[in-house]
């Protein structure tokens, strides 16, 4: 999908977030719903699918591999599964756009297919490390070519067979774990992955929903190849990573009282709630329930006086995508906040440690980047003119984080290179505006 040459945000200072809103469907679960529905037998009906560019890259890839997919239509998708061996060779490369999840998970799922395929991405994705998945996949017998630097494009060549692997991950990563489990579906014998710290378990939960046996013991998850998946109905919860911007926004903006409806509260994803509560946040989980095998709740968040903390290292994997906006919370808190153990932030869509530190410095916040985190001294937030706008570096989470910062800024905040917000949170500007943020987007 062609992006504008630049999308810029101009956000007026102040404001209060109030009312009820629902953020879009969970991106991680949306990706996985298409992947597993495609290789299942029979029809799968999906509701709540995220219609952003990242998840659509996954959907389009499977259409090009011969899977009949109807929709999305207001989040409703119907997938006619082709079974484990029913995918067909695409005509040309598969473009993953900006989506690291699409590329890494598909590397595993496609490693056991009978046809060659090449996965490509945009300029940002083409800089992101892929050896973390290609090297363990090679241990299973996969043949995947990369650039000399271990980045995309990924060239997958068919092999006679894949062999199950017992892999101990050096770094906690749900994408690596999921990629190996998806390859394990096509491997002979058992594939096991041991995690050094808990990561999101959406793949394991969804495999179970499709009738595939997954075994977990402590930090180890295993499955045996050669089984089958059966189509089902899936309801995708609202994305806690998208809700995080409003959780922080309502926490820092005086007078705020906001309810976020139907948000996924998977225990492997609730680091943002745990961290905000440790900082003094006023967050209440209401009407807990289950949707599509995932725990869900309505979340009420009210303004609170936040204090700086040392973010517990065990919460980092549970909040890895939410840390940029948590840096904004830290900038508005009393005292010092210290984050360590988050070197993964250096290799996201941007170097999120350095880019957030640079942006906070423009707002007059003392933010010291560390090799694996950040030290932030809370205080007053300044403003920017259009000429010295904060550079989001085409990173959707950076752009939205600094938009939320305007709630406590002394003047307007201008942010450039925001087009990729549509990859994860279509309608962010409109929804944030309806909740009480004074934000304008211009394209040119």
Image: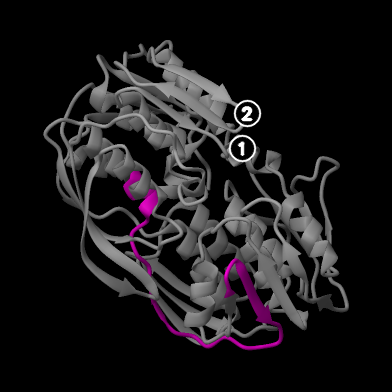
Decide if residue 407 is in sight here: yes
State the mark number for residue 343: 1
**Location of the C terminus (image quadrant):** top left
Mark 1, other Cα within 10 Å: few <14 / some 14–19 / many ≥20: some
Q: Tell me the SS state at disc 1.
A: helix
Against 196, residue 48 (above or below) is below
Decide if residue 90 is in sight here: no
Residue 307 location (% of width, % of height)? 30, 30
In the image, taking residue 243 as reference, residue 147 lies left or right, namely: right
Colouring used for the render: one colour
Residue 53 location (% of width, % of height)? 49, 51
**Which residue is identified by label 2?**
371
Residue 323 location (% of width, % of height)? 45, 39
Name the N-terminal-most of marks 1 and 2: 1
Residue at image coords 73%, 49%: 130
Against 67, residue 102 (above or below) is above
Residue at image coords 31%, 37%: 279
| Badge 1 vs badge 2, beta-carbon distance below 8 Å | yes
Q: Tell me the SS state at disc 2.
A: loop
CA–CA distance in space, label 1 to label 2: 7 Å
Residue 423 location (% of width, % of height)? 47, 47
Tell me the magenta residue range: 217-244
The reply to whether the magenta stretch includes residue 53 is no
Say which of 211 and 37 sits in front.
211
Mark 2, other Cα within 10 Å: few <14 / some 14–19 / many ≥20: few
As drawn, the residue found furthest toward the right would be: 160
Rendered image quadrant of residue 139: bottom right
The reply to whether the magenta stretch includes residue 235 is yes
Residue at image coords 22%, 33%: 437
Against 157, residue 359 (above or below) is above
């Amino acid at each position: 999908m062609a992006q504008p040459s630049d999308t810029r945000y101009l956000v007026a200072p102040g404001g209060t977030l109030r009312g009820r809103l629902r953020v879009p469907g969970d991106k991680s679960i949306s990706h996985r719903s298409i992947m597993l529905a495609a290789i299942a037998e029979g029809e799968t009906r999906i509701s709540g699918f995220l219609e952003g560019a990242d998840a659509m890259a996954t959907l389009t890839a499977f259409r090009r591999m011969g899977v009949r997919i109807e929709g999305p239509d207001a989040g409703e998708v119907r997938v006619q599964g082709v079974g484990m061996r029913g995918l067909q060779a695409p005509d040309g490369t598969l473009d993953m756009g900006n989506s690291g999840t699409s590329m890494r998970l598909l590397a595993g799922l496609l490693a056991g297919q009978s046809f060659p395929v090449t996965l490509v991405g945009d300029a940002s994705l083409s800089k992101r490390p892929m050896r973390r998945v290609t090297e363990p996949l090679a241990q299973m017998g996969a043949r995947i070519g990369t650039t000399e630097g271990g980045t995309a494009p990924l060239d997958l060549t068919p092999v006679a067979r894949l062999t199950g692997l017992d892999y101990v991950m050096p770094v906690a990563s749900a994408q690596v774990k999921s990629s190996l489990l998806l390859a394990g579906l096509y491997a002979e014998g058992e594939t096991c992955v041991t995690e050094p710290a808990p990561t999101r378990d959406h793949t394991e939960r969804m495999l179970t929903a499709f009738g595939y046996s997954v075994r977990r013991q402590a930090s180890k998850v295993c499955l045996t190849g050669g089984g089958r998946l059966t189509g089902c109905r899936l309801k995708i919860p609202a994305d806690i990573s998208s809700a995080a911007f409003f959780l922080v926004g309502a926490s820092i903006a005086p007078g705020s009282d906001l309810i976020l409806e139907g948000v996924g509260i998977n225990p492997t994803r609730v680091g943002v709630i745990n961290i905000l509560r440790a900082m003094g946040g006023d967050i209440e989980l209401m009407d807990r329930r289950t949707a599509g095998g995932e725990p869900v709740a309505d979340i009420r968040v009210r303004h609170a006086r936040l204090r700086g903390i040392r973010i517990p290292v065990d919460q980092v994997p549970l909040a890895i995508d939410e840390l940029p906006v948590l840096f904004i919370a830290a900038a508005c808190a009393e005292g010092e906040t210290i984050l360590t153990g988050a070197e993964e932030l250096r290799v996201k869509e941007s170097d999120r440690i350095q880019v957030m530190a640079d942006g906070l410095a423009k707002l007059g916040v003392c933010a010291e980047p560390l090799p694996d985190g950040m030290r932030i001294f809370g205080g007053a937030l300044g403003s920017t003119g259009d000429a010295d706008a904060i550079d989001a570096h085409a990173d959707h989470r950076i752009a939205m984080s600094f938009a939320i910062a305007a709630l406590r800024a002394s003047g307007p905040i201008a942010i450039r290179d925001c087009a990729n917000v549509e990859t994860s949170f279509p309608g962010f500007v409109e929804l944030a505006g309806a909740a009480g943020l004074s934000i304008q987007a211009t394209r040119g």
